[in-house]
Amino acid sequence: MSSEYAKQLGAKLRAIRTQQGLSLHGVEEKSQGRWKAVVVGSYERGDRAVTVQRLAELADFYGVPVQELLPGTTPGGAAEPPPKLVLDLERLAHVPAEKAGPLQRYAATIQSQRGDYNGKVLSIRQDDLRTLAVIYDQSPSVLTEQLISWGVLDADARRAVAHEEN
């Protein structure tokens, strides 16, 4: 494995770990010692080669497909990720139920599954937006515009949807 590839792989590993809110020590704790912080850190820095078997096991631990951990083909690493889709739950509460009922129920379900009850914002995935578009019988881009007009999504969400449709 080339040094540059190892560093790109390590950057992907670090990104997945931090997206999950885990420190290196947190990985060791959550895995009950299966993944030592020093080993995962050396993978992330590109100082240590990771076997395909160990990479698959690490992907399983993080709950992501292996391909999510592999560096992209974009020169210099992965392209800039699209903006996150973040629902403003406080504004959603003020949208009439006849309009926002399905979205409110969907958001409540995600909160329940994640145990995330901060009540202010909720990050959703592109797949969630596609599912909501089916529920609302609209395209993702039309639904995005509707949610922006309600003040529930930031206008930056247009970039995320445009990125997905390209």
Image (tube, grey):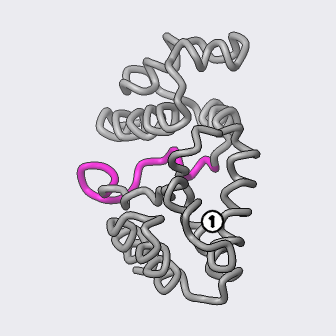
Q: Quadrant of the N terminus?
A: top left
The residue under the point 65% across, 74% down is 132
Q: Quadrant of the C terminus?
A: bottom left
Q: Would residue 125 appear left or right of 108 to someone viewing this image?
A: left
Residue 125 placed where, x, y %? 56, 59
The residue under the point 51% across, 17% down is 24
Extreme residue toward the left, this view = 76
Of the pair 150 and 6, the residue shown nearer to us: 150
Q: Is residue 54 above or below residue 166?
A: above
Residue 95 placed where, x, y %? 56, 70
The residue under the point 54% across, 12% down is 25
Of the pair 100 and 18, the residue shown nearer to us: 100
Q: Is residue 155 above or below residue 88?
A: below
Q: Would residue 7 appear left or right of 53 to someone viewing this image?
A: left
Indicate whether residue 141 is drawn in magenta: no
- Which region of the structure is painted magenta? 65-79
Q: Is residue 92 above or below residue 101?
A: above
Quarter occupied by residue 30: top right
Residue 47 placed where, x, y %? 37, 21
According to the picture, the residue beneath numbered tag 1 turns out to be 128
The residue under the point 37% across, 27% down is 46
Q: Is residue 54 above or below residue 134?
A: above
Numbered disc 1: secondary structure: helix
Q: Amino acid at mark 1?
A: Asp
Indicate whether residue 71 is drawn in magenta: yes
